[in-house]
């Protein structure tokens, strides 16, 4: 046992000296940081798209602006609610009239759905029939009065707010992405003039509205040089459609209430059934919880292969360096093989524990780096034993399985090139858990997931993949027993192949010969 | 006499090929034992069986009094024919690692590694990776890796192959040093000159079978005496001599074997005046000659 430990120790120390190991350890936090910071940074960098509208109907462009402000203002209020909760600096980006303590208290009492309605309320308040609609909104009476008070100011503030500021108070809002340039500023061009401005790059897009959009879409056009990115067109179309639909309903002489009722979409609330049949509002964090296994499977796959590959390389190196026979005068082939398998396993565990450490540390540091970092519940995932513990167990089992296959394979090869040729069929098998990753995570207890988890080479990956399911305890037990039996067999067979193969030179043996070594007793 | 190694009727087959065929011999403690034979004669296979890397199909084998070398591995040093070093490891670390694999205490192994490197003039290389060593230095380190744990029995497979004269000399020195320290050295070679210089005992095998075995002088006296000639000039005359059975002509020196009734004085007389003779004596045959005769006889045709 001491000899096994010595061999393992040397392998481990040797790996610590390789670049691969350190790249492996540090690429993870770097990728993780980039994955969080880059989107946040890009969000801030997306350029504001300028567009102009030549409105022959003379009302639609204004109506679109009004409609678009509804979701935008809802965003402002939900951001504001969050800022009140955090307090201090977070509030400073808002104008003084929104910072009153009374408004903060009122927002605190409202749920997400109610805050969303505030945008609508503000818009409706500007209309003659608005006051009547308010009764149906189901808002606490106090807030209506508060909103009434800031209405005039908020409208003025929002209309004059430059997109860069809008990005801060309402990230992702239409206002922060698109800027309508008034025609007067462009010298009142006609359609041809607008086309020229688009051509010159002064405008991202130009929209022409026909004289009677309520009656027909005729004459409505969207000009742009970039037809790959139609976000602006879709955004405009959505609100234009809403505005036109309202007019059409009015033309039917329906009351505004009925009109609003008719136009209101049906919203289905998304809920996740939690353990024990309870319900929980579907949030970003619960969706993340559902998809977290994909990341775990991916990391598991990469670490198993990276480490098993290290083992293969070191075996072949030892063989081509001719160190092997000197070693065999001190340790038996089985001891040597055991040490060679355990060494990289220690390397892998070190790497994984370092990653876990980085992830935990990252969770502590991240909120300090990024303002408005949403709480994604990553901490809950990391401390959930179903994830981290099963990751460790499946890493070890999966690694041992593939390590014993690769060490046997490495022992019969004289060069890395030969080994790569022999590995090709193995790689084909290995692609399966990657391909099935998304289908399995979507249906963790479906037929595909169940069948794959009973095929030992796939068990570690697929069971990790299903962890959000989660699989029944008997499935854990049965698949693990099956995997361990397979493992015992591959280790036994690998030891047989290893003791013959490791001293062989010349061309690699055929599969038939290798199978003969496994069957025969070479003692 | 105590034997550190005993083989009795040891046979090893690889498929249809019999690599070692009913081989028996004993290695006395404290001797330098030369294991000779042409390439492919089964030397490496025999040594691997001694080291328990292979197991014999038939026969009995005792190493340091045990059935399996595994049990006494730590008292044996083995230098295989195919040998190498971990390229990335530091020289001293590598030696210490091999020492620890032989059961040495970690600290002792480290100090002994440096001591050995210093003794062989490699102290500057102790903290450099093995890939920085020249070929000759690498060969020295390979030998040091085998003797770091001060084994009782050294088994060296072709220790002289690929060595330059300087390293060959230091290898020979190392073997003789071990003998002086009372250790036993068994080495294989197909270069007879070295065996002749340092061996106490000789074992000659071919095609897995034992051909000759005994002390160096026993083996040598088993062959016919021959004339050892050192000369300058045109050696073609040697081929015209009467009563000669065989000539090993190396251009400047030659070994001449005569028919039983032939007179060496007559040969000398014929050569005088034709070539410049620097040495002429009648003596036991060289190991080279014995080797060629034995292997030639084994193949059932005249050698040469």
Image (cartoon, grey):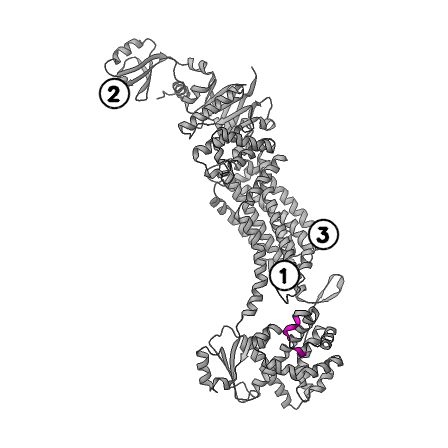
Q: Is residue A409 above or below residue A216?
A: above
Query: Mark 2 falls on what kind of element?
Result: loop
Residue that mark 3 sits on? A474
At label 3, counting other C-alpha atoms closer than 10 Å, the crowd grade (few under 14, some 14-19, many 20 or more) is few
- Marking on residue A366: 1
Residue closest to the eye, B172 or A514: B172
| Helix, strand or loop under label 1 | helix
Q: Is residue A94 magenta?
A: yes
Whether discs 1 and 3 lie on one chain: the answer is: yes
Say left or right for A152 vs B222.
right
Instruction: Please indicate, yes or no, whether residue A523 appears anywhere in the rendered image.
Output: no
Instruction: State which tag comes first along the sequence, 1 or 3.
Output: 1
The picture places residue A61, in percent across and down from the top left corner, at 56, 85
Residue A191 image position (x, y, % from top left): 47, 85
Image vertical order of residue A504 relative to residue B293, above or below: below
The percent coordinates of residue B129 (x first, y second) are 49, 39
Residue B303 placement: quadrant: top left
Q: Is residue B58 above or below residue A269?
A: above
């Amino acid at each position: 046992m001491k000899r096994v430990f010595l061999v393992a120790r040397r392998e481990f120390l040797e790996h610590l000296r390789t670049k691969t190991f350190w790249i492996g350890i540090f690429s993870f936090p770097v990728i993780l940081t980039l994955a969080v910071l880059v989107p946040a940074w890009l969000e801030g960098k997306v350029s504001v798209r300028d567009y102009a509208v030549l409105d022959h109907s003379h009302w639609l462009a204004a109506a679109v602006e009004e409609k678009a402000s509804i979701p935008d203002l809802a965003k402002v209020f939900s951001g504001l609610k969050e800022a009140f909760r955090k307090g201090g600096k977070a509030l400073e980006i808002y104008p003084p009239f929104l910072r009153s303590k009374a408004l903060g208290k009122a927002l605190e009492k409202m749920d997400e759905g109610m805050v969303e309605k505030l945008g609508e309320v503000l818009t409706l308040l500007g209309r003659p029939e608005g006051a009547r609609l308010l009764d149906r909104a189901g808002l606490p009476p106090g807030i209506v009065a508060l909103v009434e008070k800031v209405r005039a100011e908020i409208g003025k503030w929002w209309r004059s707010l430059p997109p860069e500021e809008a990005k801060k108070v309402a990230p992702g809002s239409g206002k922060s992405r698109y800027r309508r340039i008034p025609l007067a500023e462009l010298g009142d061009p006609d359609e041809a003039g607008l086309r020229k401005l688009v051509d010159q790059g002064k405008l991202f897009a130009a929209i022409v509205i026909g004289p009677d959009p309520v009656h027909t879409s005729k004459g409505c056009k969207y000009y742009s040089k970039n037809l790959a990115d139609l976000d602006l067109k879709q955004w405009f179309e959505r609100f234009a459609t809403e505005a036109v639909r309202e007019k059409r309903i009015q033309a039917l002489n329906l009351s505004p209430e009925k009109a609003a009722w008719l136009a209101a979409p049906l919203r289905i609330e998304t809920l996740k059934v939690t353990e024990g049949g309870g319900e929980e509002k579907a949030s970003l964090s619960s969706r993340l919880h559902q998809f977290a296994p994909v990341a775990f499977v991916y990391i598991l796959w990469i670490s198993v292969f990276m480490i098993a590959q290290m083992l293969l390389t070191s075996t072949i190196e030892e063989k081509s360096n001719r160190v092997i026979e000197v070693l065999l005068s001190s340790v038996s082939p089985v001891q040597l093989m055991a040490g060679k398998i355990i060494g990289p396993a220690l390397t892998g565990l070190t790497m994984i524990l370092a990653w876990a450490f980085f992830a935990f540390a990252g969770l502590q540091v991240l909120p300090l780096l990024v303002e408005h970092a949403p709480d994604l519940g990553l901490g809950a995932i990391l401390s959930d034993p179903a994830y981290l513990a099963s990751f460790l167990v499946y890493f070890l089992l999966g690694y041992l399985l593939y390590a014993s296959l690769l060490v046997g394979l490495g022992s019969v090869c004289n060069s890395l090139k030969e080994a790569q040729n022999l590995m090709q069929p193995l790689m084909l098998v290995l692609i399966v858990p990657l391909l099935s990753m998304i289908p399995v995570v979507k249906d963790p207890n479906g037929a595909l997931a169940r069948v794959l988890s009973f095929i030992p080479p796939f068990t570690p990956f697929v069971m990790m993949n299903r962890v959000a399911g989660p699989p029944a305890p008997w499935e854990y037990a049965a698949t693990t027993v099956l995997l361990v039996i397979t493992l015992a067999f591959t280790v036994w067979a690998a030891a047989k192949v290893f003791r013959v193969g490791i001293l062989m030179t010349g061309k690699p043996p055929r599969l038939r010969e290798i199978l003969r070594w496994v069957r025969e007793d070479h003692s | 006499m105590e034997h550190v190694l005993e083989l009795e009727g040891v046979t090893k087959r690889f498929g249809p090929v019999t690599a070692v065929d009913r081989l028996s011999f004993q290695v006395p403690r404290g001797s330098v034992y030369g294991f000779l034979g042409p390439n492919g004669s089964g030397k490496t296979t025999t040594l691997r069986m001694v080291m328990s890397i292979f197991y014999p199909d038939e026969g009995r084998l005792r190493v340091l009094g045990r059935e399996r070398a595994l049990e006494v591995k730590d008292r044996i040093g083995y230098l295989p024919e195919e040998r190498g070093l971990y390229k990335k490891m530091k020289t001293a670390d590598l030696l210490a690692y091999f020492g620890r694999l032989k059961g040495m205490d970690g600290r002792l192994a480290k100090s002994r590694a440096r001591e050995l490197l210093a003794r062989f003039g490699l102290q500057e290389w102790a903290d450099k990776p093995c890939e920085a060593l020249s070929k000759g230095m690498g060969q020295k380190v390979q030998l040091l890796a085998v003797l770091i744990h001060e084994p009782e029995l050294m088994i060296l497979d072709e220790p002289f192959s690929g060595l330059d004269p300087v390293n060959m000399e230091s290898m020979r020195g190392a073997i003789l040093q071990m003998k002086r320290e009372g250790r036993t050295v068994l080495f294989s070679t197909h270069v007879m000159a070295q065996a002749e210089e340092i061996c106490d005992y000789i074992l000659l095998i071919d095609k897995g079978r034992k051909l000759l075995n005994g002390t160096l002088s026993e083996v040598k006296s088993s062959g016919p005496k021959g004339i050892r000639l050192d000369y300058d000039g045109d050696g073609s005359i040697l081929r015209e001599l009467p009563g000669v059975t065989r000539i090993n002509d190396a251009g400047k020196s030659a070994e001449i074997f005569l028919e039983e009734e032939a007179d060496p004085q007559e040969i000398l007389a014929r050569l005088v005046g034709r070539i410049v003779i620097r040495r002429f004596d009648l003596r036991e045959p060289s190991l080279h000659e014995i080797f060629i005769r034995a292997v030639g006889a084994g193949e059932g045709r005249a050698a040469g």
